Image (cartoon, rainbow, N blue to C red):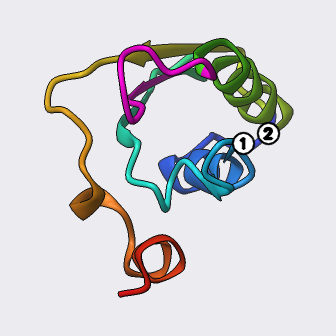
Amino acid sequence: MGKKLTKKDVVDALYNVIDAEIGLDIVNLGFVYGIDIDDDDVVKIVMTLTTPGCPLVVPIQEEIVNRVREIGAKDVIVDIVYDPPWNPSMMSEEARKKLLGE
C-alpha cells in the first residue's frame, strides 16, 4: 500500500490543469472550492468555471481526472457547481496580475 493521498498532493496535481481559454491553471483562477479524500483514496473535487456555458467543461473534467489518478487516486469525482458564482476576486494575486494587470 502506497502513501496516503493528501489535499496538498491533489492541489499540486491541479496546478497542471490549465483553462485553455484563459491560459492559467484552475487553482490560481480560484475554480477549486473543495477537495475531499475518503479512506479508499477516492477524491471528490468541488469546483466551478467562469460561466455555466463554458465550452471547456468536459476537457477540464477529463484533465482533472487524469492528473489526480496519476498521483494515486482510485477514483475522481468532479462536482461542478455555480453557487457561489465565480468572479475575478477569487483568483490568486498572481493570476490577477497576469490577467487584469493589477
1 or 2: tag closer to the N-terminus: 1
**What residue is at 39 percent from the left and 36 percent from the top?**
50
Q: Is residue 7 above or below residue 57?
A: below
Residue 49: quadrant of the picture: top left
Locate residue 64 relative to residue 52 in the image: left or right.
Answer: right
Name the spot of residue 100 as percent of width and height, x first: 41, 75
Locate residue 52 relative to residue 98 in the image: left or right.
Answer: left
Please state which of residues 36 and 101 is positioned toward the viewer in this rendering. Answer: 101
For disc 1, the marked residue is 20
Circle 2 sits in a helix, a strand or a loop, which is it? loop
| Tag shown at residue 71 | 2
Q: Which region is colored magenta?
A: 44-56
Name the kind of residue labelled 2 in the image.
Ile
**What residue is at 43 percent from the left and 85 percent from the top?**
101
The count of marks equals 2
Circle 1 sits in a helix, a strand or a loop, which is it? loop
